[in-house]
Amino acid sequence: MKKSSLSLSSSDTSALYNAPGGSSADTAFAQSELGQKLLNTLSDPKASAANKAVAEQLLRNPVRATAWGIEELAAHAQTSAATLSRFARSTGFSGFAAMRDEMAQVLQSMLQPMEKLRDAVQPGAKQGAVTQSLEAGLNNARTAAQTVDEALLSRISARLATAGTVYVMGFGISSHLAAMLSLDLQPFCKTLINVVEFGGTEVAAGRLMNIDKNDVLIVLSFPRYARDAIQLTSYARDRGAHVVALTDAIVSPLVALADDVLLATAHHPVISSSSVAAVLLIEALVTSLMVSRKANVQQAGKLTEAIAGYLISPSSKKR
């Protein structure tokens, strides 16, 4: 199988994913000129389903795609090699190989700041899975801290403060994140419903039945994405609710359905996704809401007083 004349080595791939900020290689690629072309394909209502599938695969797996042959990419995108060739030409390249070479060129430029880090690692040395896991979490946290949009958090907080009902929804591993967000937001919202607090999809759908234009839905979904989250978010959007998505990447299926998007990089070398950045953004959103109004600060004080009797304090230890 013919490979690209310019491809990324295994050490290149490792650097892109494990260097500080490198876990967001997909986001950085999407901001390139080629990445923007692919994003335009995804958002173009006239684009075919096959072309959108190809664009999504390239955006989601830019590093791996530089090593894939045309048949491999076709298999991942569930399309044909002929379709890929036509797609490449429609994007302005002479063929698939030229498009893949351009992807490699873009990714190579991202590697330049990482050369010093790579030189510090002995050839052939491999980090243990636990160390890689910890570093991935730190990288995700760093990316979240560097890219958080405080103005966006403020706008979302303003909507939450005035919403008739705030719905929080997350399935699978995201249900735990949704429960954390619900618990922290509840004292500062008029009415809050954790859509997947208990019961399955049928019960969750019932809780969303009356959502309308006066309400806000905060939906959380990370790889592997839950189909139910996408379907119920579509329902909420059709009902006119304001949708806030907390997800991992611009190619997440939630992005097209959301009015506001909070991105929490979730790359992890072993498990399907990391929750570290998501927790940071949850805390940032709750903080933004708490300090947005004087009444919220007072409410937080009342809550502390109400539960003080149930908490262990230094004075109670001495008794």
Image (cartoon, helix red, strand yellow):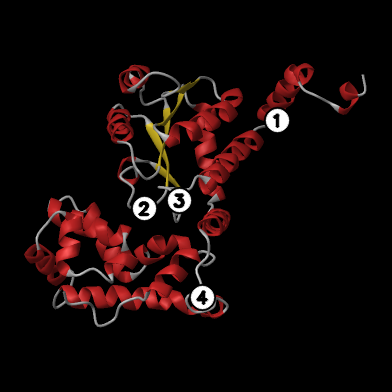
Q: Is residue 44 left or right of residue 121?
A: left
State which tag comes first along the sequence, 1 or 4: 4
As drawn, the residue found furthest toward the bottom would be 5
Residue 165 placement (x, y as % from top left) = 46, 22
State which tag comes first along the sequence, 2 or 3: 2
Amino acid type of the residue tagged 1 in the rendering:
Val
Q: Nearer the viewer, mark 2 or mark 3?
A: 3
User: Closest to the observer: 290 or 88?
Assistant: 88
User: Closest to the observer: 250 or 8?
Assistant: 8
Q: CA distance from mark 1 to mark 4?
A: 43 Å
Residue 110 placement (x, y as % from top left) = 43, 74
State which tag comes first along the sequence, 3 or 4: 4
Q: Nearer the viewer, mark 3 or mark 1?
A: 3
Visible residue check, residue 215: yes
The residue identified by callout 1 is 297
Task: Determine which quarter of the picture holds residue 78.
Answer: bottom left
Visible residue check, residue 46: no
The residue identified by callout 4 is 114
Crowd around label 2: few <14 · some 14–19 · many ≥20 (10 Å): some
Kind of element beneath mark 1: helix
Residue 25 placement (x, y as % from top left) = 41, 64
User: Closest to the observer: 213 or 301?
Assistant: 301
The reply to whether dot 1 and dot 2 touch (C-beta < 8 Å) is no
The residue identified by callout 2 is 250
Residue 66 placement (x, y as % from top left) = 28, 71
Q: CA distance from mark 3 to mark 1?
A: 31 Å
Kind of element beneath mark 4: helix
State which tag comes first along the sequence, 2 or 4: 4
Q: CA distance from mark 2 to mark 4?
A: 24 Å
State which tag comes first along the sequence, 1 or 2: 2
The reply to whether dot 2 and dot 4 touch (C-beta < 8 Å) is no
